[in-house]
Image: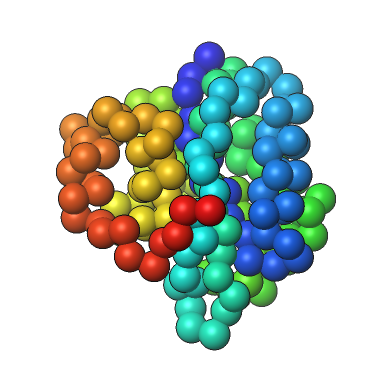
Amino acid sequence: MERVYIGLGSNLADPAEQLRSALNALAQLASSELVRVSSFYSSDSLLPGQPRFTNAVAALNTDLDPLTLLDALQAIELEQGRERHERWGPRTLDLDIILFGDRVIDEPRLKVPHYHLQARAFVLYPLAELAPHLQLADGRTLDQLLSDCPFVGLERL
């Protein structure tokens, strides 16, 4: 099994409940085990005028291959009412593969480590709760990423 970190986010339809429902679905994934979940955080939206997001990171051990896991995550999003209208727009649920073991994945549908990881405080700080001494496949440490990404616009719930 490989350790995968999944970012969760929602800013519509009771965001905290959306995350709890998604975590229940992650716990039911075939060939996978939900290991840990960070605290929930409230964060500003990347686009002005949207409601604040509720975010978390989950650690999952899985035997699924990356694209099969991506398909499963997108199915969970759809089951919870996800509609894709605009990039970074409001959503009931967003599930992103942040890291997949030590893999670097560059597929049309999937980039891992997740693009812009280094600039997303709402991912880095919850990830640090789960894996404070994490080192990425390119040699960067989570401490290095955190030092360049201040805890701004975040509130631990």
Which residue is located at x 19 percent, y 32 percent?
139
Residue 129: image location, x then y, percent: 40, 36
Q: Residue furthest top?
A: 1
Q: Position of residue 1 (x, y in %)?
A: 53, 14
Q: Is residue 98 left or right of residue 28?
A: left
| Furthest residue in direction front, as rendered | 157
Which quadrant would residue 92 be assigned to in this image? Answer: bottom right
> Which residue is more in the foreground, 60 or 151?
151
As drawn, 123 above or below 14: above
> Can residue 69 be seen by looking at this rendering?
yes
Q: Is residue 49 positioned above or below 91 on the image?
A: below
Q: Residue at x 75, y 36 (%)?
A: 25
Q: Position of residue 64 (x, y in %)?
A: 61, 24
Q: Evaluate whether residue 114 shows in this view.
A: no
Q: Which residue is located at x 36 percent, y 56 percent? A: 121
Front-most of residues 101 and 59: 59
Residue at the far bottom in the pictured view: 49
- Residue positioned 73% across, 22% down in the render: 30
Total marks shown come to 0
Q: Position of residue 89 (x, y in %)?
A: 59, 73
* Quarter where residue 152 is shown: bottom left
Tell me: 152 left or right of 60: left
